Image (cartoon, grey):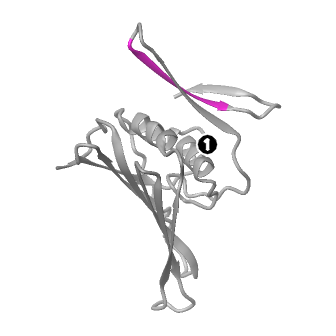
C-alpha cells in the first residue's frame, strides 16, 4: 500500500531520499543528484549522479556500506514525518523526494524544495543524518554540503508515566549553546 500526504505511522524499516540539485541556469558538469537508501539492518546504498562535460555524457557512482546503528536516523525521521507539517516549495532550487517504508510494508511519500533555512527541522535532520553517516557531502533536505562536521546532538525523551515524548536538538557550540525542542 502506498500513502501520499499522510503523516508516517508505524516503525521504520527503510528510508529512501532522492535529492536533485538541478536548478535553472546554464549547464554545469558535476554532481547534480543523489539517492540514499538505508534499511533497518544498517545497509546504506548511496548513488551519486553526475553530468559529463557534454550533455549526453552523464554517469553515476554507487557506494555501499554498513552502519552499526541506523536507529538514530530512523527515530529522527519517524518523529519529523509523523507530524503534519507544511512543505515549502520554491523555484530555481533543487528538490527532494522521500519514501518511508514501515515494517508492515506501507510506503509514505513526502517531497519539498532543497532550501537551507537554518531554523527548519529539515536542516537539522540533514545535519544529524550527515553526522550519523559521516558523509558531509549529502544534499538531503537542504541541498548544502557541509564543510565541517556539525556539533549537534539529537535526544529523544519519553516519560512512561505520562505517555509524552519530547525531542530535542542540542548545539554544543561553546560560544552560543542552544537547546531546541522539535
Asked if residue 41 lies in the magenta stretch, the reply is no
Q: Residue at x 78, y 30 (%)?
A: 176
Q: Residue at x 58, y 53 (%)?
A: 133
Q: Residue at x 43, y 37 (%)?
A: 80
Q: Position of residue 147 (x, y in %)?
A: 72, 57
Q: Position of residue 153 (x, y in %)?
A: 64, 34
Kindly tell me whether residue 23 is visible in this rendering. no
Q: Is 102 positioned to the left or the right of 38 in the image? A: left
Please, what secondary structure does the residue beneath circle 1 have? loop
Q: Is residue 99 above or below residue 18?
A: above
User: Foreground: 141 or 101?
Assistant: 101
Q: Position of residue 134 (x, y in %)?
A: 63, 54
Q: Is residue 52 above or below residue 32?
A: below
User: Foreground: 129 or 119?
Assistant: 129
Q: Is residue 75 above or below residue 150?
A: above
Q: Residue furthest right?
A: 175
Q: Residue furthest top?
A: 161
Q: Is 141 positioned to the left or the right of 133 in the image? A: left
User: Foreground: 62 or 141?
Assistant: 62
Kindly tell me whether residue 117 is visible in this rendering. yes
Q: Is 26 positioned to the left or the right of 86 in the image? A: right
Read off the magenta span: 163-170
Magenta stretch: helix, strand or loop mostly: strand
Q: Residue furthest left?
A: 1
Q: Residue at x 52, y 82 (%)?
A: 51
Q: How many marks?
A: 1
Q: Is residue 7 above or below residue 114?
A: above
Q: Position of residue 52 (x, y in %)?
A: 54, 87
User: Foreground: 67 or 112?
Assistant: 67
Q: Is 112 positioned to the left or the right of 5 in the image? A: right
Q: Bin the neighbour count of mark 1 within 10 Å (Cα to Cα): few under 14, some 14-19, many 20 and up.
A: few
Q: Which residue is mark 1?
A: 118
Amino acid at each position: 500500500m502506498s500513502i501520499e500526504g499522510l503523516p508516517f505511522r508505524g516503525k521504520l524499516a527503510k528510508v529512501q531520499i532522492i535529492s536533485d540539485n538541478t536548478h535553472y541556469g546554464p549547464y554545469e558538469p558535476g554532481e547534480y543528484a543523489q539517492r540514499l537508501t538505508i534499511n533497518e539492518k544498517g545497509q546504506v546504498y548511496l548513488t551519486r549522479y553526475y553530468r559529463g562535460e557534454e550533455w549526453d555524457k552523464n554517469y553515476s557512482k554507487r557506494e555501499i556500506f554498513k552502519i552499526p546503528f541506523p536507529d538514530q536516523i530512523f527515530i529522527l525521521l519517524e518523529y519529523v514525518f509523523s507530524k503534519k507539517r507544511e512543505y515549502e516549495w520554491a523555484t530555481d532550487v533543487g528538490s527532494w523526494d522521500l519514501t518511508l517504508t514501515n515494517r508492515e510494508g506501507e510506503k509514505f511519500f513526502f517531497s519539498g524544495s532543497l532550501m537551507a533555512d537554518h531554523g527548519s527541522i529539515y536542516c537539522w535532520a540533514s545535519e544529524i543524518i550527515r553526522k550519523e553517516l559521516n558523509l558531509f557531502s549529502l544534499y538531503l533536505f537542504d541541498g548544502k554540503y557541509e564543510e565541517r562536521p556539525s556539533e549537534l546532538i539529537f535526544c529523544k525523551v519519553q516519560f512512561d508515566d505520562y505517555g509524552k515524548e519530547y525531542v530535542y536538538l542540542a548545539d554544543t557550540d561553546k560560544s552560543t549553546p542552544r537547546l531546541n525542542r522539535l
